[in-house]
Image (tube, rainbow, N blue to C red):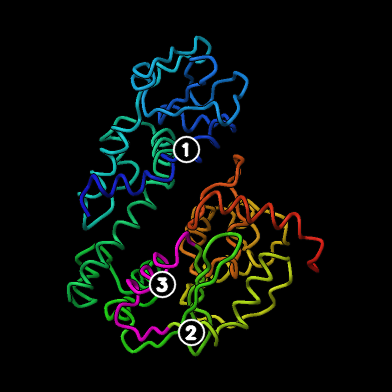
Amino acid sequence: MSHNRAVQTYMQPLFTDERRRAAVMARDRRADGAFVYGVTSTGIFCRPSCASRRPRSDRMAFFSTAADAKAAGYRACRRCQPESLPDTTDIVERICRYIDSRQEESPKLSELERNFGLSRHHLVRTFKAAVGMTPKAYADLRRVERLKQRLRAGDSVTNAMYDVGYGSSSRLYERGNTLLGMTPAKYQRQGAGMSAMFTIVETSFGKLLVATTDLGICAVRLGDTAAALERGLRSEYGLAQLRRDDTGLTPTVRRIVHHIEDGVPLGALATDVRSTAFTRAVWRALIAIPRGETRTYKEVAETIGQPSAARAVARACATNELALVIPCHRVVPAGGGTGGYRWGSARKRKLLERERVTRTKVSV
């Protein structure tokens, strides 16, 4: 993946109207400098944190820079003075490129501070607002991408491990295995020797894919089209024996659908996913969140006895392969809003709203 494509991929979570609108409604200062919004009824554009009254959603227009807003005929708000904000897009792209260039060892925050002239707090806040994750989380994901590329190219696990900067096999299997969803050796074979069946059904939340092995459910995913869901599954398990079975999986799928649509308790389901001890602890905490309620990442971290591990909790949620079965959608940012979701922020909001409506059907 090229630098520019990688940057655009990871900056995408903020650069959607949905995320921008949420930042404006929350007056999120972390988004200042990442974009500006115009009010179509007044012709004025503001920074996201502007203290002015929030316009209706259908009257918001979003622009990457103040110059873009002015070119579209809007004038700057005198109250929040959006033109005085620096454009963070360029510096975040440069940070991403710098991290990408350090293929064998991820740079520490102190190094990024020195090279980009930003305080640690401001650097992390600016980067997270634009990319949706911390510089460390970005570096971890890029490292795993490089590992995938080398394994698919035929490198041995040991050579790939050292080439991408994992200093030991224990570190690789603790961190890389969580993001790969299987052991590096198994990923190298792209599921060779594995046998799984899957089905895709329609729900009010979009298409739902459920895949199982002989041991249990290995994937539950939400998406907009059946073709994209199947393509994603096959790309991850390219050498596995995958078979579509719309009949044999009916009982399992019916339980999941009734759970999300009607609030029927899901109960225990056998699963077949690899995870670390930490990730399993996070997942147990998520399952314990009552339907219709939410917790912040910090609250989940405190629940598992690791109050300083909020970022690691967020990472465990982001890599959850069992949507709905492991209810990571019930975890939200402390600053307000619903936050990001692997299967779409709008879908997350709809899930939470449905759960609030149907919570009386569930025995908490």
Tell me the element at label 2: loop
Amino acid carrying label 3: it is: Gly
Relative vertical location of residue 332 with respect to residue 18 in this rendering, above or below = below
Left-right relation of 141 to 247: left
**Considering depth in this image, is 238 or 102 the residue closer to the camera?**
238
Quadrant housing the N terminus: bottom left
Q: Which mark is residue 113?
A: none
Question: For the residues marked 3 and 1, what is the alpha-carbon distance in whole angstroms?
Answer: 31 Å
Q: What residue does disc 1 label?
A: 17
Relative vertical location of residue 91 with respect to residue 292 in this rendering, above or below = above
Left-right relation of 14 to 93: right
Sooner in the amino-acid sequence: mark 3 or mark 2: 3
Amino acid carrying label 1: it is: Asp
Residue extent of the magenta highlight = 223-243
Q: What residue does disc 2 label?
A: 245
Question: For the residues marked 3 and 2, what is the alpha-carbon distance in whole angstroms?
Answer: 23 Å
Question: For the residues marked 1 and 2, what is the alpha-carbon distance in whole angstroms?
Answer: 37 Å
Q: What residue does disc 3 label?
A: 181
Foreground mark, 1 or 2, reads 2
Tell me if I can see residue 80 in this picture.
yes
